[in-house]
Image (tube, helix red, strand yellow):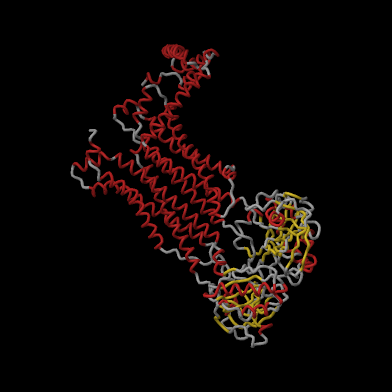
Amino acid sequence: MEIDKNKPPRLVDRFLEWYCSSKYLEEVQGDLHEWFDRRVERQGLRQARLFYIYDVIAYFRLFRLKRINEMEKNNNMLMLNYLKVAARQFKKNFWYSSLNAAGLTIGILSSLLISLYILDELSFDRFHEGHENIYRLLNHNPKTGDKAASTPSPWKINMGTGFPEIKAHTRMGQDGVLVKQAGQNYFESGFYWADENFMSFFSFEVLQGDRNTMLEEPNSVVITATKALRYFDRLDVVGEQLPIKVYDGNKDFLMKITGVIKDVPSNSHLQFDFLGSMSTTKEIYGKFDNWWGLNWLQSYVKLESKADLAAVEAKVPGFFEKYRREGASEFSGIIFQPLADVRLNSSDIHGNFEKGNKDYIYLFGFIAIMILLAAIINYVNLTTAKSSLRGKEVGMRKVFGGTRRQVARQFFIECAFQVSVALLLALSLALLILPLFNEIVSKNMTPADVFQVPVLMVLAFTFVAILTASGIYPAIVMNRFRPVDVIRGNKSGALGTKSWVRKVQVLLQFSIAAFLISSTLIVINQMNHIKQFDKGFNAEQLITIPVDDRGMQDELVLIKERMRKVQGVNMISASGESLPSDMNNTVGFSWDGKLDSEMASIHLVAIDYDYLQTIEADLLLGRNISKEMVSDSSVVCLINESAFKKTGWEDLAGKKIQLDADNRVVAGVIEDFNYNSLHSAVAPTAYILLPPGSRSSPDNLIIRLNTDQVTSALDGIDQIWRAYSDQPLDFKFVDEAFASLYGNEQKFVKMVIGFSIIGIFLTILGLVGLVSFMAERYAKEISIRKVLGASIGSVLTKFSSQFVLIFVIAMAVSLPLSYLVMQEWLQGFAFQVDVSWTIFFVAGLISIFITLVSVGGQSLKVASANPVKYLSDH
């Protein structure tokens, strides 16, 4: 032991080996070691080591340095040898290696695609310059918590003086128009009026025109490239005329094209095709400039970079107290919503554009982690397992002078090579299937998105994580073996003698599979619940037709009577809201017996006498409005079940409500029916008769068709429509419209099912590979047991029993976790499926089946084999 301790400093010796050329190393190192031994005897170990450090530094000469070509030659030879060994290992263990590479590639590919989807959702509206200081203004009722995306005109007019922190303020409002071109009429729903500073406020890409002035003049219009090509077959259309008809007021305008912009990016919540100058609308909407009760504009503000948002919001009550006038709705607050939050944080906002869902982002992110974790576990398991059989190879390398560093480097290089190939394959496949993935998730991602910095960072992290997990572990353990023991066979070099690490990995795989199975079943059940849920009215063979033309709205009674006579039309009604509807017309709500401190709002819908019969909704109390009751046209209303519960009444005897300043007698209570998706609860709603001419008057036709005469009925309706309008008939089936509300959910379900199947497949793949390896490893033991009389059943029990406890623990961990995660997701629905124990029971059965397939199949294969096959070598 004393001799072992009396050695030169190891780090100094390594430094000598590092810089000194092999031509001089043996001579120099031998002399220095000889001097060191003499000094130990004469001066002691401490003095000898100090002199050794001095001698190594003193021998540092340029002519003794390793030449670059010498170092490169050695490194290249070693690298070539490592690659040859890696190739031989792949060929020798082709099935395991292919299984490993395929699982890793699929896992990385799946996580990569999910990452692209998440990044696209998170990128919404972030391309605008200074987006971090841009806010959307939300109309807010502090008493009820209701929020709406639409705002009244006076806000901008008065906010300039009340809020000096506001650097800029712009608005836009949708107004479907009829474009008249080449003798044809085209209805364009993507037409918006916008303030003159709209294009300079936002950063949409301009192809032609001056963004600072293109919306200054009346009768100016900016169009997208797609619309320019549609109407003019070219992009250089600045200065061209575009005739349009605005249905509000039946007003025709000859618009001058002052700008062409690139199509609005898909990751913008603002989606439009035309922008008309707001000054054009003075003739039509000028009267609304001081009307607080009409919310029809989307408003955006840009704050000074150093503005304190909390201080700005604190001024809101004073603003309303100073400027708010009579006629304002109960929405009497302002919320400043960051632009980057609009996409994923607007599920509770009325009148919002297409919404995203942040819960989906969290769930997809979790699934991506699960899939990647399963792939990494598979790879690490099989890599370390196969490495455990290479003890003799490592021993021989050490006998021939291989250092620990070189052994570790070999494992790292082999692993890095395999992982690099998997990453390149995953990237190539991602580029190949990106168009198909775009179609499934309704995105417009490009190959450039695959190489954006966050994606590359995810891939780099994956590379490092796999390399660390599968390279360090075998390198450290294998380096501990003494070559003489390994070569003599005294130590197998197995990494699995302490099997708790592998058991934890198998536990994680079982847990991932069970979590994905149970979560997928809950998602499928919820979507089936949505499809089968009773809406409260009959949506079958029901169509709605928007009537935007004010002239046609004045003629609705006559149009209804003509369409009623069409063969195949069973019932027809007019309504101020379509089905489905966001119910944007909300007013203050008061009732008999209401406390003064209570504040409530209620949706207001204009209907006619045939509304309930047409949609086939039921009355709970009272009566329907009737033509025979003359007073019903002006003083009577219907309310829904939610409004009735809000009042706390027990009956309708003499009961009245107040809708803003309009007093109404409640004639009947309608059973609640869903006018929107099941994400939203049914809110209090009042139904009244309104004559034409009001902005709340009926502007939709709702028609019930005979199932056997749908085509002929639509033809007859179209003929009558053409007699009143130049606009093509635009109708939709109500059941299909409701189904379209769940477009995001349908995409979500497809992705969840698809990626869950991949995750489960990876789990099976990993378990099959690992169990196959373990079965081969214990094949001789199993064969000896069979020779000594053990039955196949006892062998199977012995081999499979080690997985039973792991499986039970995995179920105990994953199923409660799945319940908690999915309960959070279900909170986004007002009407939820009950998560019963049967779902987890089925998930457990499926997990048992997976276990039997992956563990039992391979176990049976070895247990059934002829013992001679495995004992012949001995």
Who is closer to the viewer here, 720 or 292?
720
How many discs appear?
0
Among the 4 quarters of the image, the one containing residue 222: bottom right
Q: Residue at x 48, y 63 (%)?
A: 526
- In this rendered view, identify the residue nearer to me: 271 or 798: 271
Quadrant location, the N terminus:
top left
Report whether 91 appears left or right of 740: left
User: What is the x, y in percent for residue 736?
Assistant: 55, 67
Which residue, as the protein is rendered here, is positioned at the far left? 789
Q: Position of residue 675 (x, y in %)?
A: 58, 70
x and y, in percent, of residue 216 in the image: 80, 56
Which one is nearer the viewer's eye here, 326 or 12? 326
Question: Is residue 776 shown left or right of residue 447?
Answer: left
Spot occupied by residue 409 in the image (x, y as percentages of width and height) = 45, 29
When the figure is inspected, residue 478 is found, relative to residue 277, above or below; the finding is above
Give the left or right position of residue 15, taking residue 190 as reference. left
